[in-house]
């Protein structure tokens, strides 16, 4: 009887571990590629692959686009990001809000332009876009960020974005933008962007 008990306990433990591993694997999938313009790909744990529409994307995965490439990523919380050409984005952190708690989302933009639209994490917790030049903390937001007109620009369509460098920060609201040149220099004061500049930004992430 004691041997049978040990066997049953081992079987239950093995089943529990396999279920836990399966759930962990499911949680690692944080979004999908919903639209793209070749060429776009991804790299995870040293393994590279080309992306196709519907491809699953994972926490810690780096997504890239080639010259002329575009890719749209839809995350499981409803947020999305569009990458322009020659972009590199690492999906660093993603935690869904549960039980009234706050979630978190961290995307690390290495190069290129992007357009971000917030989802459940953005509304209830903390979403940050980290770049070599500044960190953007966003809330209820749709915004553009990337190289434009010889500087790194950030423009808010709706919501609010705090743009911070080592030298200072600004808070952007609907229709406002800022320009950055170095991580050691504060962002320029918020300024309304005109229609021509907005159109140039949209072209960088449009199809």
Image (tube, rainbow, N blue to C red):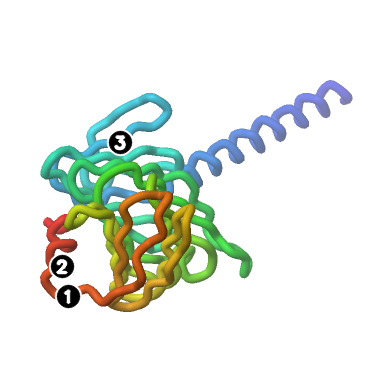
Q: Nearer the viewer, residue 113 or 133?
A: 133
What is the spatial separation of the Cα atoms under label 2 and label 1, in whole angstroms? Answer: 6 Å
Q: Residue at x 17, y 38 (%)?
A: 66
Q: Quadrant of the C terminus?
A: bottom left
Q: Residue at x 33, y 75 (%)?
A: 158
Residue 11 sits in quarter: top right
Q: Which mark is residue 197?
A: 2
Residue 183 image position (x, y, % from top left)? 40, 49
What is the spatial separation of the Cα atoms under label 1 and label 3, in whole angstroms? Answer: 35 Å
Q: Are marks 3 and 2 in contact (CB under 8 Å)?
A: no
Frontmost of labels 1 and 3 is 1
Q: Secondary structure at mark 2?
A: helix
* Mark 1 neighbour density, 10 Å: few (under 14) some (14–19) many (20 or more): few
Q: Which mark is residue 42?
A: 3
Q: Quadrant of the N terminus?
A: top right
Q: Nearer the viewer, residue 19 or 140?
A: 140
Frontmost of labels 3 and 2 is 2
Left or right for 42, reference 9: left
Vertical position of residue 141 compared to residue 67: above or below: below
Which of the two labelled residues, at mark 3 and mark 2, occupies the earlier sequence position? Answer: 3
Q: Are marks 2 and 1 in contact (CB under 8 Å)?
A: yes
Q: Secondary structure at mark 1?
A: loop
Q: Which residue, given by chain and number where applicable, does mark 1 sit on? A: 194
Q: Which mark is residue 149?
A: none
């Amino acid at each position: 009887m004691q041997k049978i008990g040990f066997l049953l306990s081992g079987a239950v433990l093995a089943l529990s571990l396999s279920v836990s591993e399966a759930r962990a694997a499911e949680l690692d999938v944080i979004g999908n590629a919903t639209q793209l313009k070749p060429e776009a790909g991804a790299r995870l744990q040293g393994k590279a692959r080309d992306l196709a529409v519907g491809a699953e994307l994972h926490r810690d995965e780096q997504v890239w686009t080639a010259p002329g490439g575009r890719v749209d990523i839809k995350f499981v919380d409803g947020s999305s990001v569009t990458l322009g050409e020659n972009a590199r984005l690492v999906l660093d952190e993603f935690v869904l809000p549960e039980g009234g708690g706050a979630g978190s989302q961290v995307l690390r933009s290495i190069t290129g332009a992007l357009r971000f639209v917030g989802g459940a994490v953005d509304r209830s917790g903390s979403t940050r876009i980290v770049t070599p030049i500044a960190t953007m903390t966003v809330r209820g937001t749709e915004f553009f960020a990337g190289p434009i007109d010889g500087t790194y620009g950030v423009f808010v369509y709706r919501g609010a974005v705090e743009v911070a460098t080592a030298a200072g920060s600004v808070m952007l609201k609907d229709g406002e933008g800022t320009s950055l040149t170095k991580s050691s220099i504060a962002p320029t004061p918020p300024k309304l962007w005109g229609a021509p500049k907005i159109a140039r930004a949209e072209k960088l992430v449009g199809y």
